[in-house]
Amino acid sequence: MEKLYEGKAKIVYKTEEPDKVVIYFKDEATAFNAQKKDIIEGKGILNNKISSIFFNLLEKNGIPTHFIKQLSDREMLAYKTTIIPVEVVVRNLATGSIVKRLGITEKTPFNPPLIEFYLKNDQLGDPIICYEHILALGLATEEDIKKIKELAFKVNQVLKDFLKNIDIILVDFKLEFGKKDDESIVVADEISPDTCRFWDAKSGERMDKDRFRLNLGDLSKYYEEVLRRLEGEKS
Amino acid sequence: MEKLYEGKAKIVYKTEEPDKVVIYFKDEATAFNAQKKDIIEGKGILNNKISSIFFNLLEKNGIPTHFIKQLSDREMLAYKTTIIPVEVVVRNLATGSIVKRLGITEKTPFNPPLIEFYLKNDQLGDPIICYEHILALGLATEEDIKKIKELAFKVNQVLKDFLKNIDIILVDFKLEFGKKDDESIVVADEISPDTCRFWDAKSGERMDKDRFRLNLGDLSKYYEEVLRRLEGEKS
C-alpha cells in the first residue's frame, strides 16, 4: 500500500478507493513534543481497538467521524480527510500543562468544560492559540470553528457518560478534526489512552499516557484494562 | 501620600477623594518579565506626558479612560479602578513574540487587527489565554469581554489614524482595563512607547521599548521624538 503520511504513532495508507484510507497503529510512544520516546509493544493494537469502540460509540450518537471499520489488529479503514491543523482539547478537570501554565489547582473542575485550541505544529511545539489566531492564520472559518466546538462538547458528553458507567473519569482529551471530500467536518485521528486522560473512578489511578509521561510504568496493563472495561460495556 | 500599589514602572497613591488616585511614573525599564532591568532617566516624565496626550485623545473620541488630568511631570490624576487581570494586546503587524511563537513572517499585516489576551501574572510570566480561560478563571464576564474587545478595537482605530498623521506606524500595543466604582469599564494603566510599538513611517526605526529590549540604545531620544510629534499634532 502506498504511504500517504507517517506520524508519530500512526501511518496512513492509500486504498483503491480515493476517498478511503487505511490507518495503521504503531507501537511508538512519544511525549513532550517527542523529546521522550519509546516503543511499547502492543500499544498500537490496543489503541486501534479502543479507538474503534469510541468511534463506533460516537457514530451511534450521531457524531460524524472518519471511522468506517476496524480491519485488523493494527488497521482501521477510515474516510480520507484533510486534517484541520488545530488540536482541540476539552478539559473536565484541571491537570497537566494547564495547572502549571495558569496556576490552577490540580483537579479543579471546569463547568462548563474548558475547550482549548493548539496549533498542530511539532516544530513550534504545538503552541496554544485562540479563536482569533485560527481566523488570522486562516486555519479554519468561523463556521468551521463553531461546528468543531459543538462537536467537541458533544464528544465530551457522550464519552464522559459512557466512561462513567465503567468507572472511568474522563479528565481531558485531544481531538483532531478533518474535512471529508464533501467538505463535511468529522472527528478524525484517534481516541485512545494516548489522547485522553482516564482516571480510575475508585482508585484514582492513571489509565493513560501519563503512565509513560510520568514514568509510572505498566502502560500496557492499564490500556488493556481500559479495553477490557469498554468491551464489557459495549456487549 | 499613601501608597496603594507599586508596579514595575508606576506607583499608585491614594488621594483625599476615595474614587481618585495619583499615578506616579518611574524611570524603571523592565523587559522579558523583568529579567532585564535598567533605569532610564526621564522616561517616567516622557511616558506620563505621552500617556496624558493619548488618554485625552481617546476621551475626545468617546472612549472612556481612567484619566482625569496631568498633575505634574511625573504625576497623573486618575479614577481609581479595579484592574481586570487581563492584558489586552492588539496587533496590526506581526512582530515580537508572536512571530516566533506561531511562525508568522515578520511584518505580516493582520486584517482585521488581531486581539490577544494575556493573564496579568508576573509569576506565571503573563501566559497567553483565550476567551474561554477568562470565563473559566472568572477574570471577567462575557459582557465585560465584549466591551473590552469593542473598546480595544476603537482605541486601535483612533490611535492608528492619529499616529499616521505624524508618520508613526502603530504596530501593536497592550491595554489594561479597569472597573470604576460605578462598575463601568475604562481604559486604564498607561499608553506610551513602553506599551506600544511605534515605527517611524519613513525610516522604519523603532521608537518604543524595543530599543531597550533589543539593546538599540537612544531610548529617551526616540521617546522625546514621539512626544515632540504628538505635541506638534495636538496643537
Image: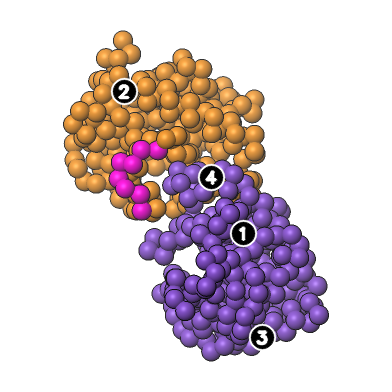
Chain colours: A purple, B orange
- In this figure, which residue is indicated by the disc labeled 1? A186
Which three-letter amino acid code belongs to the residue tagged 2? Lys
Q: Which is closer to the viewer, label 3 or label 2?
A: 3
Q: Is residue A182 magenta?
A: no
Question: Disc 2 sits on a residue from what chain?
Answer: B
Front in this rendered view, residue B203 or B67: B203
Q: Which is closer to the viewer, label 1 or label 3?
A: 1
| Nearest to N terminus: mark 4 or mark 1 | 4
The residue positioned farthest toward the front in the image shown: A16
Label 1 CA crowd tier, 10 Å (few <14, some 14–19, many 20+) = many
Front in this rendered view, residue B5 or B64: B64
Q: Position of residue A189 (x, y in %)?
A: 56, 67
The alpha-carbon separation of the residues under discs 4 and 2 comes to 31 Å
- In this figure, which residue is indicated by the disc labeled 2? B164
| Nearest to N terminus: mark 4 or mark 3 | 4
Taking the image as drawn, is residue B13 in sight?
no
- In this figure, which residue is indicated by the disc labeled 3? A224
Judged left or right of residue A30, residue A210 is: right
Which three-letter amino acid code belongs to the residue tagged 1? Val
Is disc 4 in the same subunit as disc 3?
yes
Q: Which is closer to the viewer, label 1 or label 2?
A: 1
Span colored in magenta: B103-110
- In this figure, which residue is indicated by the disc labeled 4? A141
